[in-house]
Amino acid sequence: MEEQKNSLSVPVAIVLAGILIAGAVLLSNNSPKQDNLGKQIVDNATSDIPFVPVSADDHIVGNISSPVTFTVYSDLECPFCKNFNETTTQIVNSYVKSGKVALVFRNFPLEQLHSKAKSESNAAECAAEVGGNEAFWKYLNKIFEITPSNNRLDPSQLSKTAKDLGLDMTKWTACQSSNKYFDKIDSQIEGGAKMGVNGTPHSVIVTKTALTQTQKESILTLFLKIDPKLISISKDGKIVSISGALPFSAFQKILDIMTK
């Protein structure tokens, strides 16, 4: 009995081996190769991004000629933007001061949610008119610091902040009361909306040197664990558009890839 059992086991083993090999071949033929998988990931997240280029009219921290610009569309009454302002401060300390990145702010008040936000954006623009770019950023950071968010900032804080910064109050008040920069704010809202901004904060990272396929895959792979819907990359590989208040650690990985 023992000999008969052994003699049967050999052909059975051969048949099983053949089945396993055939199955492996079929799986190999039906599964995309790693290179193709990476290409699919990139293709799925690639789109046209009609971003309005950064110019001297924007509010910038750092050198506009930096290899990478990081533009944030933001709402001064958005609680997520308030938290994200701390992230952009870390970006300034880690990348802007070293000359790798320039930080840009653009207004995107969500008026249907925060009726005070547009007036606050105007106040910051008036701070820039009266005190220059540095005054703009100081004003902006102070408003983010003191606002309770969700449309709860006391309007009197706008003039108090301007006064505390030492701005010429006659000029600032005239600018603020006339809503002088509403057209500029509306233009920034329109420009953001055309490229798909529908919430805040929204970040647009632009590199002067197009990303390689490997760099694209590396960046997009990060979002497989977060949410692939939050990111898109322009077809020319120079623009990365990201929705939401991601932590600094996520942007650190992205910027490290883009500034190599």
Image (spheres, rainbow, N blue to C red):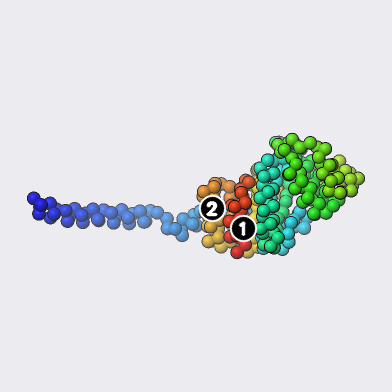
The foreground one among 48 and 142 is 142
Q: Name the residue type under label 1.
A: Leu
Quadrant of the rendering where the C terminus is positioned: bottom right
The foreground one among 183 and 115 is 115
Q: Name the residue type under label 2.
A: Leu
Specify few, some or many for label 1: CA neighbours under 10 Å numbering under 14, 14-19, or 20 or more: many
Measuring 25% from the left and 56% from the top, which residue is drawn there?
18
Tell me the residue that label 2 is attached to: 222
Q: Determine the image quadrant of residue 145.
A: top right
Measuring 61% from the left and 49% from the top, which residue is drawn there?
247
Specify few, some or many for label 2: CA neighbours under 10 Å numbering under 14, 14-19, or 20 or more: some
The foreground one among 80 and 20 is 80
Side of 116 relative to 228 (left or right): right
User: How much space separates mark 2 and mark 1, taking CA atoms?
Assistant: 12 Å
In the rendered image, the vertical position of residue 116 relative to residue 73, given as above or below: above
| Lower position in the chain sequence, tag 2 or tag 1 | 2
Q: Is mark 2 on a helix, strand or loop?
A: helix
Q: Is residue 257 visible?
A: yes
Side of 203 relative to 32 (left or right): right
Q: Residue 53 at what x, y percent from top left?
A: 71, 56
Q: Residue 254 at what x, y percent from top left?
A: 59, 56
Q: Do the residues labelled 2 and 1 touch (CB within 8 Å)?
A: no
Measuring 20% from the left and 54% from the top, which residue is drawn there?
13
Side of 187 relative to 214 (left or right): right
In the rendered image, the vertical position of residue 229 relative to residue 68, given as above or below: above
Tell me the residue that label 1 is attached to: 255
Q: Residue 202 at what x, y percent from top left?
A: 65, 48
